[in-house]
Image: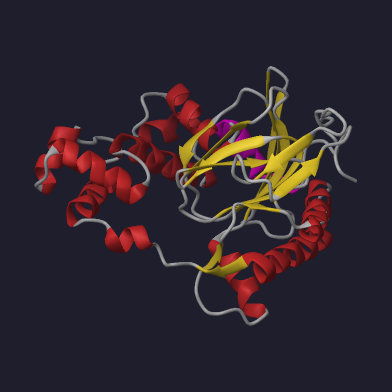
Amino acid sequence: MSAVSGELAHYWSHPGLPDVGLLRARFVTHRFGRHAHEGYTVGLIESGVEEFHREGTLMRAGPGAVVIVNPETVHTGHAGVPEGWAYRAAYPPVAVLTEIAAEFGARPGTPYFRDAVIDDPQSARLLRAAYRAAQHGDALAAASRLRSALAGLLHRHGGVSPERRRDRCAPTAVRAARDILHERLVDPPSLEELAREVGARPFTLLKAFRAATGLPPHAYLNHLRVRRARHLLDEGLRAAEVAARTGFADQAHLTRHFKRTFGVPPGAYQLGRTRVSAPSPEPWTSTPEEPGKPVKLGKPGDPAITFKTGPGPLP
């Protein structure tokens, strides 16, 4: 568990699907940096409002909204109201969604969700039930309900991924620069050295790299370091050793970047990976909203998806 200034976050492993991570959190001042996950993020907003940038667009999600981020999609996350937001999230790997899609005869390919903020009460109810079953360590119910919820979302809102268009269209210099950063996590080159190694001008490389990956080279490097750190933590290495192996200055440096990606510090993440139920069945109460106050979802200015908030979490 992580708790700072009234903010709480619990991370643990799904009791029936060990490769699926689970998070329940309430954040007020915490901000997720620009990052991407290897798998999917499937969240359910319980109270408050979350705002996040995805592919250059600012999105808003309020109570009852399902939030989905596709793999390798750069996004952020922060409170959209002063009271913050509370939510539950699952992080299923690509293999889980691909298997579910194949079971009901979807087209071959990596599943892809067109919309990041979805108004689907049926899926929201199933997700809520799945998260609560997982919170209590009920492996059978949690896995059955999560699979049902994901199948419904795929059927009604899913498609097939455009297969990493950025990878295919990235200039040769960007692909070469990316390979160099992958190889040199601990001893990376400067921008000038990187540009020289790939035969480009520094500013030209900087612009092309950001356009191709969604991140500038230095942020991409930290993204790689955090991802590698997560895998090392999964192997049981101590956070201090992980920091040294991934190029962070020290454990505090690792912690700062890790929390901006996963919402919890490395130690809490590593401890959570050994749990198959949340530490407490009800670790907090959701932030009450002003009764009847409308919260618009989706892109600001888009009136298509609107919820009215109530005095507490949805039943």
- 256 shown above or below 210: above
The residue located at (38%, 36%) in the rendering is 222
Taking depth in this image into account, of 192 and 58 the one nearest to the observer is: 58
Residue 65 percent location from the top left of the image: 73, 48
Taking depth in this image into account, of 39 and 286 the one nearest to the observer is: 286
Apparent side of residue 251 relative to residue 97 in the rendered image (left or right): left
Residue 246 belongs to magenta span: no
- 139 shown above or below 13: below
- 143 shown above or below 283: below
The residue located at (45%, 29%) in the rendering is 254
Residue 269 percent location from the top left of the image: 60, 38
Residue 130 percent location from the top left of the image: 79, 55
Taking depth in this image into account, of 32 and 136 the one nearest to the observer is: 32
Apparent side of residue 297 relative to residue 37 in the rendered image (left or right): right
The residue located at (89%, 32%) in the rendering is 311
Residue 1 shows up from this direction = no
Residue 241 percent location from the top left of the image: 43, 32
The residue located at (34%, 58%) in the rendering is 166
Apparent side of residue 154 relative to residue 252 in the rendered image (left or right): right
Q: Which residues are magenta?
A: 265-276
